[in-house]
Amino acid sequence: MNDFFQQLKTNLSELFIYEGLTKSLISTTLLVLAFIILRLLIGRYLKKHIASTDLRRKWHVQIRNGLILLMILGLVIIWSNQLQAFALSLVAIAVAFVVATKELILCVTGSILKTGSRSFNIGDRIQIKDFRGDVIDQNLLATTILEVGPGKITHQRTGRMTVIPNALFVSEPLINESFTHDYVLHVFTIPLKREDNWKEAQKTVLKAANKYCKPYLEEVRKHMRQINEERGLEVPSVEPRVTLQVPVAGEIHLIVRIPAKSGERSYIEQSILSEVFSNNDFSVKKNENAG
C-alpha cells in the first residue's frame, strides 16, 4: 500500500510539472501571437492616419520597442516558476563546482597573487613553510624548486626537487632570500661558551671575513646603490661585521654578516670557518694550559 501511494505521489508530481510546462508553452504562444497581431494592427493604423514618412517611422520604432519590452516582461511572468527552479539549480551546481575545485581555485588565486606582487622570479631562493630552495619552474598551479638544506641555515642543494602548490602563497608568508639578486647579505652564527676567548674569536672572524669579501666589496656597494635608486630602499652597510648575541645564560653567539655573491654563500662561509678554526682554538682549556 505504501508503494502504491508513493508511486501515485510521484505520478501526480510529474503530472503537475507537465501541466505547468504545458500552460507556460500555451501562454507563451498566445503572447507571441498577440504581439504579432497587435504590431500588424498598429502598423496599418499608422499607415492610414499618419502621412509623414519620418513621423510614421519614428512612431513605428518606438511602439515596436515598447511591445518588445512588454513581451519580455510577459515571458518572465509566465516562466517565473521555471526560471526560479533553473536559478536554484545553477546555484547548486555552482556551489558543488566550487567545493569540488576549491584547491584548484586556490592554486590559480595564489598564482595571480605571486605574479601581481612580483614575489620572486626564476632562479630566486625562496622559503615557504618548511620548503626552501631555488625556483626552477612555475606555472598556473604549482611552483617547482630545487631543495636547499638541510635546515634553514644551510646553503647546499640536497638534490631533491619539490613541487609547491600555489595555494600556499595565499595563506602562508613567503621569504625571498634573493631579493637583492646578484649579491646578498649572508648571516651565519658561531656559538661559543661564555668562558671561551670570544673577544679574540670576534677579531679573528672579522679579519677572515674582510679577507674573503675584499675582492668584490666595491662591486657589492655599487649593486646595493643601484637597488636603492631603483626601489627607493635604504640599503644597509655592506662591510663585514661580527656582532654578539647572548641567547641563553652561559653562551655567547657571534653573529657574522658578510656580503656574498648569490651562488657563493656557502663557499664563503665555509672558507671563513675553515681558516678561523684550523689556525685557532678559543676554548678555555687551551687558555688554561697556555697559562
Image (tube, rainbow, N blue to C red):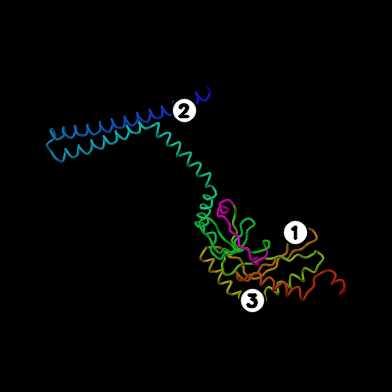
Q: Which residues are the magenta region?
A: 153-171
Q: Nearer the viewer, mark 2 or mark 3?
A: 2
Which amino acid type corresponds to the residue marked 3 in the rendered image? Lys
Give me the C-alpha separation between circle 1 and circle 2.
Answer: 76 Å
Q: Residue 170: where, in percent of width, then height?
A: 56, 52
Which amino acid type corresponds to the residue marked 1 in the rendered image? Pro
Residue lying at 53% horizontally and 47% vertically, measured from the top left: 102
Q: Categorize mark 2 by other alpha carbons within 10 Å: few (<14), some (14-19), many (20+).
A: few
Residue lying at 64% horizontally and 69% vertically, measured from the top left: 265
Q: Residue 150: where, in percent of width, then height?
A: 68, 63
Q: Categorize mark 1 by other alpha carbons within 10 Å: few (<14), some (14-19), many (20+).
A: few
What residue would you read off at disc 2? 10
Pointer 3 or 1: first along the chain: 3
Check the image and report above or below for 146 versus 212: above
Q: Nearer the viewer, mark 1 or mark 2?
A: 2
Q: Residue 95: where, in percent of width, then height?
A: 50, 41
Mark 1 element type? loop
Q: Are marks 3 and 1 in contact (CB under 8 Å)?
A: no
Q: Categorize mark 3 by other alpha carbons within 10 Å: few (<14), some (14-19), many (20+).
A: some
Q: Is residue 155 magenta?
A: yes
Residue lying at 29% horizontally and 35% vertically, measured from the top left: 69
What residue would you read off at disc 1? 247
Which amino acid type corresponds to the residue marked 2 in the rendered image? Thr
Give me the C-alpha separation between circle 3 and circle 1.
Answer: 30 Å
State the residue in front, 19 or 71.
19
Q: How many marks?
A: 3
Decide if residue 263 is on the left or right side of residue 46: right
What residue would you read off at disc 3? 214
Residue 91 tag number: none
Mark 3 element type? helix
